Amino acid sequence: MKITRNRQNFVVPMNAMSDVAFLLLIFIMLVALINYRREVKIDYPEAHDAKKTSAEKNMEIWVDSAGLTYLDGLPASLEAIEEAVTDAYRNAPGTRVHLIADRNTAFRRVNEVLSVLQLLEYRVVSFVVKDE
C-alpha cells in the first residue's frame, strides 16, 4: 500500500507584511509613551520655602484625606510599607522616601507612617508640598 501526498506550494503574500510592521511600530511607540506612575488625588499642603529634590530613585508613600496609605500609588498597609522601605534600603541605600499627604489628613495618620520610618531609622525622607 503506497501513500501519496499532494504537495502544494504555499505562497505567503509579502505585500501585507509592511503594513503589519508599520502598525507594530506605531503600537510600540505608543506603549513607550505611557507614564506608569500611579498617583492618588490629594490636595497638597503649601509651604513658603520648599526645596526641590530629584525625581530619580525615590519611593512615594501617599496618605489621603481618609487616612488610607498607598505605596507608589497602590494601596498598602503599614507592614507592607515597612517591608518595601527595608528592601529599598537594602538594594539602594540612597533611595529617598517622599511622603505625600493630603492637607486635610489627620496628623496621627501621617505620624503612623513617620513612626515606621523612625523605627527603621530611615533618614532620607522628604515631605512633598505645593510651592506658593
Image: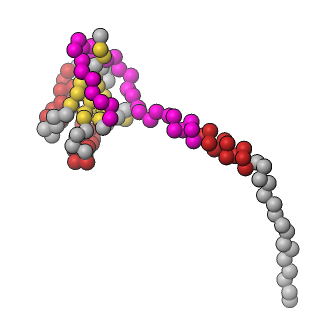
Relative height, residue 97 to residue 21 (above, below)? above
Q: Give how far across and how far down residue 87 sits, in percent.
A: 25, 46
In percent of width and height, residue 91 lies at 25, 48
Q: Residue at x 73, y 50 (%)?
A: 17
Quadrant where the N terminus lies?
bottom right
Residue 70: in sight, yes or no? Answer: no
Q: Nearer the viewer, residue 64 or 85?
A: 85
Q: Quadrant of residue 28?
A: top right
Q: Does the magenta segment cover residue 66?
A: no
Q: Residue at x 16, y 37 (%)?
A: 122
The residue depicted at 21 percent of the width and 31 percent of the height is 125
Identity of the residue furthest to the bottom in this view: 1
Q: Which range of residues does the magenta coloring cover?
A: 28-56
Query: Could you say where residue 16 lies in the image, as x and y percent from the top left?
Result: 76, 48
> In which quadrant of the rendered view does residue 82 lie?
top left
**Horizontal side of residue 112 vs 26, given as left or right:** left
Residue drawn 25% across and 39% down? 95
Frontmost residue, 112 versus 45: 45
Magenta includes 41? yes
Q: Is residue 36 visible?
A: yes
Residue 42 in picture, x, y percent from top left = 35, 20
